[in-house]
Amino acid sequence: MLNALEITTAQTSHPTTALLLGSGELGKEVALELMRLGIKVVACDRYPNAPAMQVASAHAVLNMKDKEALTELIHKVKPDVVIPEIEAIATDVLLELEEKEGLRVVPSAKAANITMNREAIRTLAANTLNLPTSPFFFASSIGEVKKNIEKVGFPCIMKPIMSSSGKGQSTLKSEDDIEKSWEKACSEGRGHENRVIVEGFVKFDREITLLTVQACDGIHFCEPIGHHQVNGDYHESWQPEPLDDEVLIECRRIASTVVKALGGYGIFGVELFIAGKSVIFSELSPRPHDTGMVTMISQDLSEFALHVRALLGYPVGSIAFHGPAASAALLGQGMGNKITYRGIDKALAVGPDCAVRIFGKPDIDGERRLGVALARAATVKEAVEQVKAMRTAIEIEITADKEAAKEE
């Protein structure tokens, strides 16, 4: 597995090395921004030919939840900085190496460890920082769920304490749903741990992402991002999501409070519920956010460029917003290792300020996000309409490339 490091390494004149843990579409953009500043990037993921690996100086394929394998990789690469880009990482290894060997983790090993675990981040937000959240409780058995369900009432949501993109999440409408929801959470959550969070429904008007950058020159905020999700996974996002001044101030207060508590430099995707004039903390990721891909067309510095500037200790300065914009996920459905895209020309002709990003994922089994359509327009509504039209124009054909399969 680690031999890939020896056969794919390219020479670079810059001594700084970044180890990227997670090489999907978000990691690919981070890798590109790092390389633009002369940083050598070693991209790591559980499968070969991941998007970031296609542009990085070197790569490694391994299970990042394997403590021994991750430790071996870090000692082999000797990175100047480790950048976690996904949640499925043995973060206790990062904590140990940060403490004992001075390993630099972005934004910190503490932040990576806390935010990958819903129990840790919710406890920090609600109990330590006293931020407004939905009603919730944690449980390690079906019996505990039944005993405490009255604390949140029906309907409610059950989630694994460790998962992402809606995996293992389900809605409970009555006690009859408890057992099947429990099985789903335990089987689909990361590590298949038998522990869940049960949250009461929040009657919110909107859900937003507030990209918050903590850098050497202070805390910076991007324009609020609105988004549409299906089963916990983003389908469209837009910027700006209009907010009253007092609501925006409260959003920024909550975001800066939790970001300061976590510490370190980088970008944080802070998810918030808006209910009238009230703002409720939902979740947070200490890295670029999938809904934030809209910033690739809406701002002079994308969320990826901002993340890299901050984590390298460079000032962010000002963030120039170019105007209303939107993004739409291009989803593929099927099974195969040959993915063909048609109609990109038609998609790019939808409007004067349109762009398409194809991630370069090597294969698909089921449903997978394969690209994103981007558009900037006079209004948010027009931008959303354009990216939806772009998505419709692009046809994705999935087949099995037998020759490629033989080589693998």
Image (spheres, grey):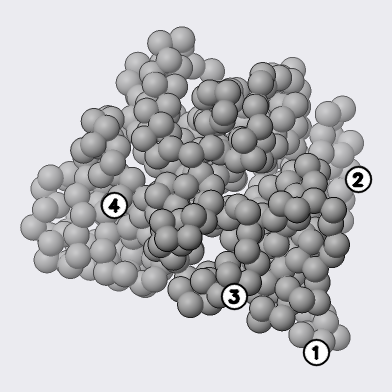
Q: Nearer the viewer, residue 296 or 73?
A: 73
Q: Secondary structure at mark 3?
A: loop
The mark nearer the N terminus, 1 or 3, is 3
Residue marked by disc 2: 345
Q: Which callout, 1 or 3, points to the residue nearer the camera?
A: 3
Residue located at (64% from left, 40% from top): 312
Residue marked by disc 3: 62
Q: Which callout, 2 or 1, points to the residue nearer the camera?
A: 1
- Image marks 1 and 3: residues in contact by CB distance under 8 Å: no
Residue located at (46% from left, 12% from top): 244
Task: Classify mark 3: residues with Cα within 10 Å, few (<14), some (14-19) or many (20+).
Answer: some
| Amino acid type at mark 2 | Asp
Q: CA distance from mark 3 to mark 4?
A: 27 Å
Q: Which callout, 3 or 2, points to the residue nearer the camera?
A: 3
Residue marked by disc 1: 406
Residue marked by disc 4: 119
The mark nearer the N terminus, 4 or 1, is 4
Total count of labels: 4
Q: Nearer the viewer, residue 298 or 369?
A: 298
| Amino acid type at mark 1 | Lys
